[in-house]
Amino acid sequence: SKAAAWNAEEVKAELLKKYPPKVARKRAKQILINEALENETPEISANVRTIPGIITMRGCTYAGCKGVIMGPTRDIVNLVHGPIGCSFYAWLTRRNQTDAGPDGENYMNYCFSTDMQEQDIIFGGEKKLAAAIQEAYDLFHPRSIAVFATCPVGLIGDDIHTVAAKMKEKLGDCNVYAFSCEGYKGVSQSAGHHIANNQVFRHIVGENDEVKPGKFKINLLGEYNIGGDGFEIDRLFEKCGITCISTFSGNSTYDQFASAHTADLNAVMCHRSINYVADMLETKFGIPWIKVNFIGAAATAKSLRKIAEYFGDKKLIARVEEVIAEEMPAVEAVAAEVRPRTEGKTAMMFVGGSRAHHYKELFNEMGMKTIAAGYEFGHRDDYEGRRVIPDIRVDADSRNIEEIEVEADPTRYQPRKSPKELEALEKAGYQFKYYDGLIPDMDNGTLVIDDLNQYEAEKLVELIKPDIFCAGIKEKFSVQKLGVPMKQLHSYDSGGPYAGFQGAVNFYREIDRLVSSKVWGYLKAPWQRDPQLSASYNY
Ligand code: CFN
Ligand code: HCA
């Protein structure tokens, strides 16, 4: 392994060297050298604005709301009010998969947009939006139509909520509601998650009180069926005898959201994107939530056990053990097969708001070390694994950006207090929720970097040369051109599923192929490698 050949302090200094002093000071608070085991890692600055001029890896609020949270639901018509590019460039790129069954409704392959033009920007687009809702209704008669605002909608002041309410009333049997998720709001996708959570809770959850059959009823929150992950998790739930009432939101339906309040437990997979729904279900309906992670075979086993323990049913606990015992041998066999080639190799991961942490487990199982990791838009609670349970105002108006900023209130989030201070806070009535966070899980001396940008990504790869680099499409080719294999942990390139037991097997094999390939050594042309050849070409 090349791991020992670099020094974290030097790397950090090198990353900051090119910035003007003010920018360097700000970035320094987002680049940490991990010492979490001694609990001495300084506080990370997260969920803050990207400094203008920096080419961030982040996406926008519209992406977080329409693309991430609402996008994977198959029988809601997701209508984007905006210029066509916002729809076109988000069309099926996330690889969230759907199986509607033989007769099921599925609008996933469609791309619905009002296709705003210059005249709509000047004279207003409300009439065009109402007409588009009517057209979608006439064509498909969907159970529900969701309207999403893009940047210009907020700038010109189209009142999409009033249009949606009027159309809902006019259509009668179709729930129509809107999301003020203009791309420029907030600092990243994260604001869009919050807006989507609030609206889905206000307009859909609780609409269907019908009690579904099943003994152990859960909702799976924060699982989006990327590359079929959700299908593998569903397979395991079924095998164990756990009933999944709703998934937020991979391969989900309107009715699943509407019935979510009939479940007994919420299992939260991606905390960042859906914690607001988890909190609201707890506050309004008394359904508690636990953190799970189905990325990694050990993590999957642990999460299934956690769910069974919550119900405390002897038969369920025994069944879960049976399933684990049945599934693990195949996983362990492949892990043992790849390990001679993967052991000791190094990985870097810069993804979203939970995967940079979740995937560390899978690399661990292959004997690989994560030497640098970070989120694009995680908050401090995602880094530190501890948060105050907020008192959610369920009826707060999500059109108001203030509600999003509630989270920045320092009295609500006290994640890095000493045990004594925490005790005092707990006595004062604050309730904490604890779960695994990225920082406590990283080894000493590794790098934790928030909102990594394109420049720093290339610098990191040049300086440390990891055996594999994981991020998104914007990083894919610049990294590979530096001679380092790159795995997309958003879309999984064309692969997956990587969740659950079968997913772990897929991942081991894929990473083995990538880090063992000799192709990266042939990246330089002969004359670039050999000075003598180079001289003879340059006569
Ligand atoms: S599927 Fe999720 S797991 S929802 Fe979130 S924070 Fe994004 S779209 Mo890309 S891959 Fe990524 Fe996470 Fe949760 Fe995906 S790490 S950035 S907004 N994300
Ligand atoms: C988004 C979606 C994204 C982008 C992935 C990428 C996804 O943030 O808008 O940059 O490759 O997972 O599809 O995160």
Image (tube, rainbow, N blue to C red):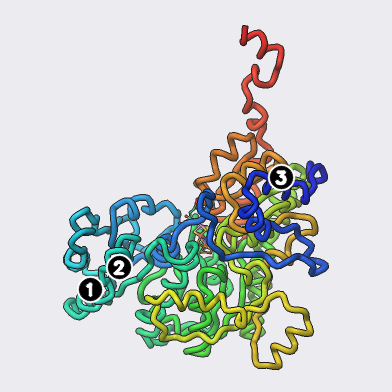
Q: Amino acid at mark 3?
A: Glu
68 vs 483, left or right, is left
Task: Look at mark 2 in the image and give the residue it sits on.
Answer: 147
User: Which of pointers 1 and 3 lies earlier in the amino acid sequence?
Assistant: 3
Query: What kind of element bears circle 2?
Result: strand
**Rendered image: mark on residue 14:** 3
User: Which of pointers 3 and 2 lies earlier in the amino acid sequence?
Assistant: 3
Task: Look at mark 1 in the image and give the residue it sits on.
Answer: 163
Q: Amino acid at mark 2?
A: Val
10 Å crowding of disc 2: few (<14), some (14-19), many (20+): many
Q: Position of residue 259 (x, y in %)?
A: 41, 81
The image quadrant where one finds the N terminus is top right
Question: Would you say the residues marked 1 and 2 are in contact, meaning their CB atoms lie under 8 Å apart?
Answer: yes
Query: What kind of element bears circle 1?
Result: helix
Q: Amino acid at mark 1?
A: Val
**Label 2 CB, ligand 2: below 8 Å?**
no
Residue nearest the viewer, comparing 396 with 335: 396
